[in-house]
Amino acid sequence: MFVKRQKLYNNLLGKKGDYVATSKETSREKIVKKVLELLDNHPDGLHYSALVREISKIMPGIPINTIHGTVWDVDVQNPSRIYKPSRGLFRLSRFKSEDFSSLTSAAATSKSKQSMIIKEEGFYEPFADWLVNEIEDCTKAIALGKNKFKDKWGTPDVIGKNESKRSDIIQAPIEIVAAEIKTDINQLITAFGQTCSYRLFSNKAYLVIPRNSPQDEIARLDSLCMVFGIGLILFNIEDVDNPDFDIRVRAIKHDPDMYYVNKYMKLIEEELFK
């Protein structure tokens, strides 16, 4: 407010040139400049926390509150240069252009070729083990894939069960867990639709996608998964021995349609229940 009054006062006096900025304003200008530099090096954009963290490292002398105060609405203050493709994600406006579409297409092709080096099926067993041993959502999980269910609605890549131990005083009903794993970042929407269909016969459903997927698509899937109660897992596509599965959204347990539960479980009874 003071700065605006000072500028107006200078104009009324007919002074030439810009007014003298305060040290705080100079810091804000430096922050905005650095935001633009960082976003220029990240065509997919950067999240708010990442921008604040990077700027804080680069400019340790600037108070953290000044950084927060500048970054949180930097898109509003610079609408011609910065925009938000999704909540909390900042990107340079110039990447909306066709040049960025070409860049994204090229990057997607490169990543798709990379995913072919390690086949998708290579991550089925590691994820099945992760469900059992890491987050203990299953007492047994198996790799499935292919067309085991012989159904146009698709077959989960991994399916598991969670049942009470014999020593448990209270025996809970058996729960079914299904997962769709995708290494092709061009098929994320298709994968989400498939995962939704698994809720028909499973108590929990997971969508497992590469960590290097476009940030705006991850953000959209994040929101969709929360709405539909689907678990979202990110993983390292480059190392089948260490996928580093990480939960982005927790799967919410629900009651499936028991007709379809029994229909599909009969097809894998030998593998999963014996």
Image (cartoon, grey):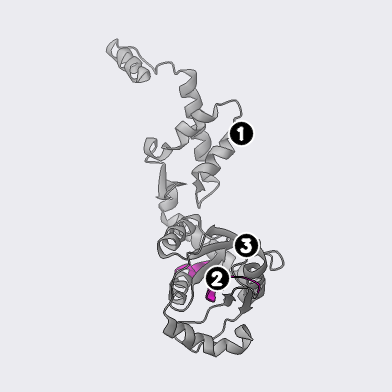
Q: Secondary structure at mark 3?
A: loop
* Residue depicted at x 53% and y 57%: 248
Q: Nearer the viewer, mark 3 or mark 2?
A: 3
Instruction: Looking at the picture, tell me which residue is in the foreground, 9 or 181.
Output: 181
* Residue depicted at x 58% and y 76%: 160
Q: Which residues are magenta?
A: 167-189
User: Up-down: is 191 above or below 80?
Assistant: below
Q: Is residue 114 magenta?
A: no
Q: Secondary structure at mark 2?
A: loop
Residue 70: horizontal and vertical position, in percent? 46, 32
Q: Mark 2 highlights which residue?
A: 182
- Number of marks: 3
Q: Mark 3 highlights which residue?
A: 245
- The residue type indicated by label 2 comes to Lys
Location of the C terminus by quadrant is bottom right
Residue 75: horizontal and vertical position, in percent? 40, 40
> Splitting the image into 4 quarters, where does residue 118 fall?
bottom right
- The residue type indicated by label 1 comes to Ile
- Disc 2 packing (10 Å; few <14; some 14–19; many ≥20): many
User: Up-down: is 206 above or below 66?
Assistant: below
- Disc 3 packing (10 Å; few <14; some 14–19; many ≥20): many
Whether residue 129 sits left or right of residue 46 in the image: it is right
Instruction: Looking at the picture, tell me which residue is in the foreground, 222 or 168.
Output: 168
Q: Is residue 183 magenta?
A: yes
- The residue type indicated by label 3 comes to Phe
**In contact (CB < 8 Å): disc 3 and disc 1:** no
Q: What is the number of the mark on residue 58?
A: 1
